[in-house]
Image (spheres, rainbow, N blue to C red):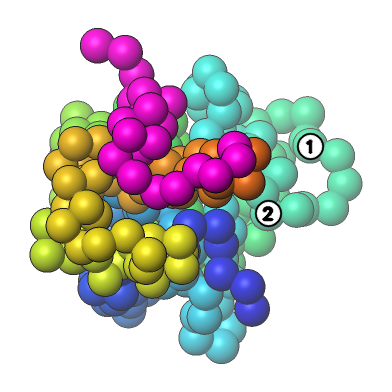
Amino acid sequence: MALPAGAQLVRTSSVRAVAEAVGQAMATQGAVCVFGDPGRGKTVAVRMALGEVPPGWKVTWVPVPVRPSVAGMRRAVFDALALPGRFPHTSALADAAVAEALGEARVLVVDEAQRLPAPCLEYLQSLWDHPGTRITLVLCGAGSERALSRLPQLASRVVAWQEVPRLDAAEVAPVVTGFHPLWRTVPSPDLTWIDQSCAHGTFRTWAALTAHLQNALLTTADASVDRGLLRRLFKRVAPPL
């Protein structure tokens, strides 16, 4: 099975920690919150952790609507479950169809959960609390822990709070050289300088910088990986101050 884009940039320890947290939640049909600053690789870590689940379990990713509302979340869950037929014309019928589908063991993943207002989180909790459902709820996103803190009745059901941290300085070289062979040509002190000057331990920034560097080497005659080129690329992956 092919790994999702950027998967190699997420260190094994993060994936293992997320997998353990999700496993604990699955064992109790509880909830887990995966949080951390933007660009830390939370979504990729969850996808990798859920790459293989025990027999009898299914995984469903529920997208957060552009303007989250209970009606929008109800439709998002219905569509994510790929239920047959048209979306029911009443909320009661839609909830009944969703609850029936959630009667089998399932991990329900909601990415960008920090965007959900309290009523939407309460709707997810109602699905989870329904006596006929068998759900493990994974709420993922930068700030998702703060969103949950505004709904104590749901936060109290979280069995694992798992942070995905930024790369430590000592991890930068082995992780980025494993991510792309291009970085294996760059001396370790320069990798440290890149992280301190631009990436700051952020997976997403390293991935963007890799793409820009590849393009520069392919399109610019006699280009080489030096600090002059890298300084120019830093401006492309970081917003102006």
Could you classify mark 1 by the number of other residues whose Cα lies within 10 Å: few (under 14), some (14-19), or many (20 or more)? some
Q: Is residue 175 above or below residue 204?
A: below
Q: Quadrant of the N terminus?
A: bottom right
Displayed quadrant of residue 79? top right
Q: Quadrant of the C terminus?
A: top left
* Residue 232 belongs to the span the image colors magenta: yes
Residue at 48% x, 57% y is 6
Element assignment for label 2: loop
Q: Is residue 20 above or below residue 111?
A: below
Displayed quadrant of residue 147? top left
Extreme residue in the front direction: 222
The part of the chain drawn in magenta is: 220-241
- Of marks 2 and 1, the one in the foreground: 2
Q: Is residue 124 visible to us here?
A: no
Name the kind of residue labelled 2 in the image.
Answer: Leu
Q: Is residue 6 visible to us here?
A: yes
Could you classify mark 2 by the number of other residues whose Cα lies within 10 Å: few (under 14), some (14-19), or many (20 or more)? some
Q: Nearer the viewer, residue 210 or 69?
A: 210
What residue is shown with label 2? 81
Residue at 16% x, 57% y is 189
